[in-house]
Amino acid sequence: MHSYRETCHKKFTWPYHKVSKDRESRSQSVFDYSLFTKKSGVHIVEILIYVDNLLLTSSSKVLIDEAEIVLHQEFKVKDLGELRYFLGIEVIRSKHGILLNHKKYTLELIFEMGISVAKPAVTPLEVNQRLASVEFDKIAGLQSSDPLVDVTSYQKLIGKLLYLTLTRPDICYAVQSLS
């Protein structure tokens, strides 16, 4: 029989937080230092912190109210109401579930890269496309295109595309191939 850790590793899934078995407990996640949880009975409240942004969620309105009171006592906090945007991701709620959308981020990226007039493609990368480095081309004696003048702008673009794959799994293969 496999241990819990081995099973998670094989399935590429990991718990977001570690909550102690006490009836009421607070903890900082061992997997993400910016995630804090508090468990009270069957309910849990989670606070995710990124620089100066807080995301507060819970299975109980009472726990949310308690957490807000504590946060307001300790910090200068502005409540923006129900979550709409967080770190460039639009959150849309409906009776069918929650939709995470990077539309605004994607449009900003398209205009920043100057490709707003480019034609859309069914696949983001040519089928069976093989990419090779300049070093490989030299060793194999192949004709290569000119190397990038500014590598940092390419790295920045790949980083932004990697972030975009959070809500666009259809581009994962292309972004991974280009990275």
Image (cartoon, rainbow, N blue to C red):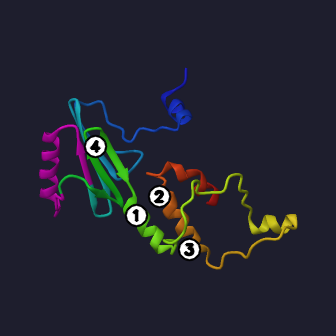
Q: Which residues are magenta?
A: 55-80
Q: Residue at x 35, y 60 (%)?
A: 87
Q: Report which residue position mark 2 lands on.
A: 163
Q: Where is residue 29 shown, x and y percent of the image?
A: 36, 45
C-alpha distance separating marks 3 and 2: 15 Å
Q: Nearer the viewer, mark 3 or mark 1?
A: 1
Q: Where is residue 118 shown, x and y percent of the image?
A: 54, 69
**Mark 1: few, some, or many residues within 10 Å (few <14, many ≥20)?**
some
Q: Nearer the viewer, mark 4 or mark 3?
A: 3
- Residue 82, placed above or below residue 178: above
Q: 29 or 83: nearer the eye?
A: 83
**Mark 4: few, some, or many residues within 10 Å (few <14, many ≥20)?**
many
Which amino acid type is shown beneath numbered disc 2? Answer: Tyr
C-alpha distance separating marks 2 and 1: 10 Å
Q: Residue at x 58, y 57 (%)?
A: 124
First in residue order: circle 2 vs circle 4: 4
Which amino acid type is shown beneath numbered disc 4? Answer: Thr
Q: Element at badge 2?
A: helix
C-alpha distance separating marks 2 and 4: 25 Å
**Mark 3: few, some, or many residues within 10 Å (few <14, many ≥20)?**
few
Q: Report which residue position mark 1 lands on.
A: 105
Q: Is residue 68 magenta?
A: yes
- 108 left or right of 46 in image: right
Q: Report which residue position mark 4 lands on.
A: 37
Q: Report which residue position mark 3 lands on.
A: 153
- Residue 104, placed above or below residue 146: above
Q: 119 or 26: nearer the eye?
A: 119
Q: Is residue 129 magenta?
A: no
C-alpha distance separating marks 4 and 3: 38 Å
